[in-house]
Amino acid sequence: MAEHTQLIDAINIRTAVRAYDNEPIDDDTARQLEMTLQPINLLADLDIQLVRDQPKVFAEANASGHLTNAANYLAIVGPKDDDEAKERAGFYAERVVLAATLRGLGTLWVAGSWDRAEAAKHCRVTGAQELYLAVVVGHPKDHLAYQSKSYDELCEIQRAHRPSKSYEQFTALMSDEAREAAPAWFKAGVEAAMKAPSAMNRQPVTFTYNAADDTAAAHIDPAAGDEHWALNDLGIAKLHFQIGAGQGQWAWGDGGLFIHK
């Protein structure tokens, strides 16, 4: 339960950070992140890697002002042409993102604000693998002031950070009556998913509850126009939902079921 509470805290304060302090990630913090990565990669059958001090990967975005001082990233590497692996990548890489958040680091999922070819030079990608996406990671701008803020202040920053789709939009396939009758764990799961990042910030996932067997399902919303990254975003949203709902487990895939335990 302690870990669950911590992950809920991370969800409640995580924001997309675009501006970073020009300060490297120290070796101790890097070791802590690597210790998080090792078991997650084994569990997920992925090869997520922390790459430090490579500002060339974000040179164009830094020069344009879209990003500031971005230099470190999580390289999300997995099997080629494997849809389930892309979903697992979103689920498990977001777990690393939440761990980084709890250590006071800022993060940003990037789909287009990086040089993929340059990034591939600094991480391991075998012939049977591909580099899916990256997550910028580093100390947020003015990070000492950031770290001095209370949990409630950080929650308020998250709440006001960007607009999110509404609960009704996230449950668009349900009737008003079904939404009202859904159990508290389902509502808490959706509320956590509403705070999930997505690669193009389109939040292309919806959820439904089936009272007949007490399960939830997650669906890719084709109207969101994010087909290229939708599986990754589905994995991210599923993780947030699972943390919010508490005990339970997802089946992979579009339409996969969540069994609440």
Image (spheres, rainbow, N blue to C red):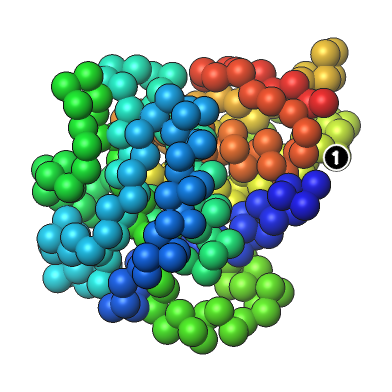
Q: Quadrant of the C terminus?
A: top right
Can residue 233 be seen at all in this image of the molecule? no
**Left or right of residue 136, residue 243 in this image:** right
- Circle 1 is placed at which residue position? 184
**Left or right of residue 70, residue 151 in this image:** right
Mark 1 nearby-residue class (10 Å; few <14, some 14–19, many ≥20): few
Can residue 117 be seen at all in this image of the molecule? yes
Q: x and y percent of residue 210 in the render?
A: 78, 19
From the viewer's perspective, is residue 243 above or below residue 215?
A: below
**Left or right of residue 164, residue 45 in this image:** left
Q: x and y percent of residue 41 in the render?
A: 44, 33
Q: Residue at x 31, y 77 (%)?
A: 23
Q: Residue at x 24, y 28 (%)?
A: 130
Between 174 and 27, the one lying in front of the other is 27
Say what secondary structure mark 1 lies in. Answer: helix
Q: x and y percent of residue 37 in the render?
A: 45, 43
The quadrant holding residue 73 is: bottom left
Between 168 and 206, the one lying in front of the other is 206
Q: Residue at x 25, y 72 (%)?
A: 69
Q: x and y percent of residue 91 in the render?
A: 51, 35
